[in-house]
Amino acid sequence: MSHEEGDFRIATLSVVDADGSAGDGTTTAVLTVIRPDGTTTQPTVTPSDGGATHTAAAYEFTAAGEWVERWVVTGKGAGKQRTTLLVAPDPAAALTGMRVYATTTDYATYLLAAPPAGARRALAAASREVDRMLLTAIYDVDDDGLPTDADVAEAMKLATCAQAEYAKLTGDANLVGAGAITQVGLGSLSYTRAKAGVGVDGNPRWAQAAWDLLQQAGLTGHPVGEPGWIY
């Protein structure tokens, strides 16, 4: 089961003794929740079914990262149990303060389909790549750094969608360079990147479609077909 920052969780423990019998009135369970920063909380635990089941009060995942639930049981069925829970960032809050040139609605319209999971983060990563493509471009922006010209904004929006889709198809949706690795090894640990090239087989970092859209808007300053791939 996946979890995201801001979700609430109700932890439940079923207690069974070594002989297979359920916990009873002597059974006590304490839950300690360890947050990603190492701090802890202990939700109130309520027994039911004569001590066979223990249910904790709901708690909130207040941060992304690794959370740990640690149960300690005393009395009948005494023992310990630990569960690790992996929590993803809030997909909306993760983009605070970042320039993103397309929304998930724009992305769905571009794909003519529902956007994939993680679309906000993929669009944020693609927007950073569009910024790299336009590193020396000159265009008018507002106080947030977003383009004010409608044609420029449209080109950057579509280029962002094209880049996000390309990155997903090449297996590197968040643009960490994974799509460019063609060989790995264990032991002394080595990896090999794909050779640079203009074309799908070379797995260039930038989508040709994204570059073409920006070029057609007069933003790149390069002749047609020279996207200047970066690795």
Image (tube, helix red, strand yellow):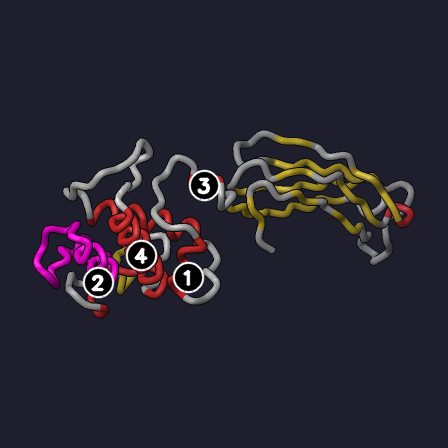
Q: Tag 3 or tag 1, which sits nearer the N-term?
A: 3
Q: Is residue 103 left or right of residue 89?
A: left
Compute the Cα span from label 2 to label 3: 28 Å
Residue drawn where x is 63% and y is 47% of the image? 83
| 174 falls in the magenta region | no
Give how far across and how far down residue 140 sits, in percent.
22, 38
Q: Kindly give the residue lying farthest to the bottom in the view shown.
A: 201
Residue 109, numbered label = 1
Label 1 vs label 3: CA separation?
22 Å
| Image: 123 above or below 168 | above
Residue located farthest toward the left when viewing the structure as drawn: 223
Determine whether the residue tagged by mark 2 lies in a helix, strand or loop.
Answer: helix
Q: Is residue 176 visible?
A: no
Nearer the camera: disc 4 or disc 2? 4
Q: Nearer the viewer, mark 2 or mark 3?
A: 2
Q: Residues within 10 Å of mark 4 (few under 14, many from 20)?
A: many
User: Do the residues bearing badges 2 and 3 touch, measured as CB atoms within 8 Å?
Assistant: no
Query: In which quadrant of the rendered view does residue 59 lie?
Result: top right
Q: Tell us which disc is closer to us: 1 or 3.
A: 1
**Label 4 sits on residue:** 158
The region drawn magenta spans 203-231
Q: Amino acid at mark 3?
A: Ala
The residue wearing badge 3 is 94
Which-is-in-front pick, marks 1 and 2?
A: 1
Q: Position of residue 91 (x, y in %)?
A: 49, 46
Mark 1 or mark 4, which has the lower sequence index?
1
Element class at badge 4: helix
Find numbered disc 3 in the image and state the secondary structure of the residue it sits on.
helix
- At x 39%, y 35%, the residue is 97
Q: Mark 1: which secondary structure?
A: helix
User: To which residue does mark 2 refer?
Assistant: 208
